[in-house]
Amino acid sequence: MLVQNYGVTYHDKSKSTPGYTLYSRNFSDQIWLINMDGDVVHEWKTTGGSTHFHYLRSNGNLFVCERVEEGPKLVSGKSGRMREYDWDGNVIWEHVDDHQHHDARRLENGNTVYIAWHLLTSAEAKMVKGGLPGTELDDEIYGEVIREVDGGGTVVWEYANNAPEFLNKYSINPLASREEYGHANTISPLDNGDYLVSYRVFDLMVIIDRQTGNLKWEYQNHQLGGQHDCQVIDNGNILVFANGDKVPGGIPNFSQIWEIDPESKEIVWRYFAKKNPLTFWSPHISGCQRLASGNTLICEGGQGCIFEITPEGEVVWEYINPFFGPHPAMPGSEINWVFRAKRYSADSPEIQNRI
């Protein structure tokens, strides 16, 4: 969407899905819960640093990834401290790993799974193919590890993408930096205990078998353009925000939402701005959520725009983040970027009797 106004800019009450939307501006220490009119009905202020990713747990607590200064000098998605706050903003749990970035989830068994950087050995780095030559970080390349810890912070399971067969199979997008081998941005736990993971610079999504550590499903499509927020929805399909960035040949330079049948690997539904595709475009961050009504909530992160569409692609609610602030790597800038947004119904366990 082309930003013209802020707050709720459009609302068709007869077609939208009622609820409360949770979001934060990138690099802000505040998280807002807004109603359908755009009014802030509840907010949290983190005490451990700016937030990147967050969501409400079924007990009403807020799980947050907060930025720390320690760790690798990588900027994109950097977090490092995972915290759980109660509804009133009190810290009730935390775990620090200064290599953690982008995404993390609290599990029902009390464990936590998250994405972290790990430094490739010189031998592994020599096997990395693709990317822009000379863009390593101090001549080093960081790979990705999916790490699960128990409630006390002890590592109980890991999956790293440094196996020779993985390094031989997947190359970095030729227009992307070589400082990261993977740029994982989503870790989505599945009902059977496996993990769905998005690797942005490979245009790749995989399902990791939690028991064997093997890849049981792989989907690579360079038209994804550095995707975000892949998730299995109620019908078993995979919903994903296809950013459309650094696509071979430069087309498309616009974003889409794809619904993919994991068996056939066919795209069974998609959304893009049909009248002018360039008006829906976020080359980075962003997300999506299939709502109970069948509508889809979309976070066009680079524009600070959150909007809801029907299955036919009709926009029925739109909100532009009015809260601007600085970007630490862009001196003098004022951004309203939103990494992800999520809507909760009034009768959901996360919200019920709390507002």
Image (cartoon, rainbow, N blue to C red):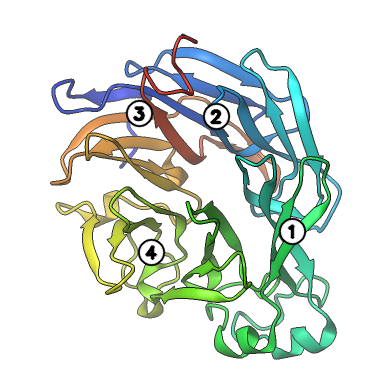
Residue 28 in the image, given as x and y percentages of width and height? 64, 31
| Callout 1 amino acid | Leu
* Label disc, if present, on residue 74 of the rendered structure: 1
Tell me the distance, in whole angstroms, between the alpha carbons under discs 2 and 1.
23 Å
Query: How many C-alpha atoms fall within 10 Å of the one at disc 2: few (<14), some, or many (≥20)?
Result: some
Q: Against 240, is 327 above or below?
A: above
- Residue 172 location (% of width, % of height): 57, 79
Rendered location of residue 342, percent (x, y): 43, 34
Residue marked by disc 4: 244
Question: First in sequence: mark 2 or mark 3?
Answer: 3
Residue 44's image quarter? Answer: top right
In the picture provided, is 77 more to the left or to the right than 275?
Answer: right
| SS at circle 2 | loop
Name the kind of residue labelled 2 in the image.
Phe
Element marked by disc 3:
strand
Amino acid type indicated by mark 3: Tyr
> Which element type, helix, strand or loop, lies under badge 1?
loop
Q: Secondary structure at mark 4?
A: loop
Query: Would you place residue 234 above or below residue 82 in this image?
Result: below
Q: Earlier in the sequence, mark 1 or mark 4?
A: 1
**Which one is in front, 143 or 105?**
105
Where is residue 119 drawn, in percent x and y? 80, 71
Residue on which disc 3 sits: 319
Q: Is residue 147 above or below residue 80?
A: below
* 2 vs 3, front mark: 3
